[in-house]
Amino acid sequence: MSECMIKIVLIDDTNDAVETFKESLRRWNPNENFDIIKCTNFSNALNEIKKVNPDVVFLKSRKIAQKELNFIDSLPKKEFHLIISLVVGYGDWNPVRLTDLPLTGRTENTNLTYQSVDKINISADGKVYFLNRSDVIYLKSDKSYTTIFLSRKRKIVASKTLKEIQKKFIFPEFYRVHNSYVINLNHIVEYNRGLSELTLSDGTVVSVSRRKKNQLLEILQLERKS
């Protein structure tokens, strides 16, 4: 169990927001402790952010309009992650795996992350690619470059480290199983317990590090070998 209490400001005007949010967080962050403060409007949220210095601010919204932009512009210059989750209609949303974020006390960097419904934007080769999450099979590190492997045998090479590129892949289906690999959990087709290896939908075999093995088994709801 982590000794670090992650302070969260949640901006959501639904009645059962906190319990739903906690349930989702526990699923993807089983070893973390949370202190969640719910705010139903931007004014209250700004006051709480200034007062408690949160690690992460979650905002659920159906669109990015002027009031959302004004809120972002008015945020204090503090070290925290702002994650905006766009939802369609009254659908629920999936929070990120917080252990994949460099939170306050674990890094000196401040990060503003925009989480859309399905698209991930990647800059490479002088272009900006908008990728469907379901098309991304895995990411592979190659020193200062990262190769993104997609369905239909496509790939994109970005001139950034895997650590930098991973900040774009904040969705819960993406998991770093090894220093060199981030995989899409939805593309796993086989797990070899003896070798601690995953086979992905394109036939790629990826090793799982010892440090990541137990948490991966929990996520996949697999029993550990006695």
Image: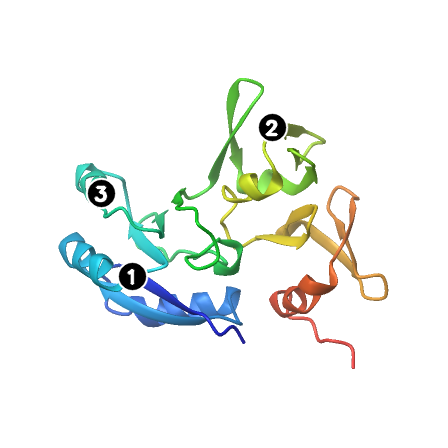
Q: Which residue is mark 2?
A: 159
Q: Earlier in the sequence, mark 1 or mark 3?
A: 1
Relative horizontal placement of residue 19, taking residue 159 as reference (left or right):
left
> What is the CA distance from the residue labelled 1 to the residue labelled 3?
16 Å
Percent of width and height locating residue 158:
60, 29
Relative horizontal placement of residue 106, taking residue 147 as reference (left or right):
left
- Report the quarter where the N terminus lies: bottom right
Instruction: Look at the numbered discs 1 and 3 and tell me whether their residues touch, using CB distance below 8 Å.
Output: no
Q: Nearer the viewer, mark 1 or mark 3?
A: 1
Question: Is the residue marked by circle 1 packed among few (<14), some (14-19), or many (20+) residues within 10 Å?
Answer: many
Task: Assign a secondary structure to mark 2.
Answer: loop
- Residue furthest to the left in view is 43
- Residue furthest to the top in view is 126
Which label number is shown at residue 68? Answer: 3
Question: Is the residue marked by circle 3 packed among few (<14), some (14-19), or many (20+) residues within 10 Å?
Answer: some
Relative horizontal placement of residue 131, taking residue 116 as reference (left or right):
right
Disc 1 residue type (three-letter):
Val
> What is the CA distance from the residue labelled 2 to the residue labelled 3?
32 Å
Relative horizontal placement of residue 35, taking residue 98 as reference (left or right):
left
Disc 2 residue type (three-letter):
Ser
Percent of width and height locating residue 208:
74, 57
Percent of width and height locating residue 35:
34, 71
* Image position of 102 with respect to 156: above or below: below
Of 6 and 214, which appears nearest the observer?
A: 6
- Count of number-bearing discs: 3
Which label number is shown at residue 9? Answer: 1
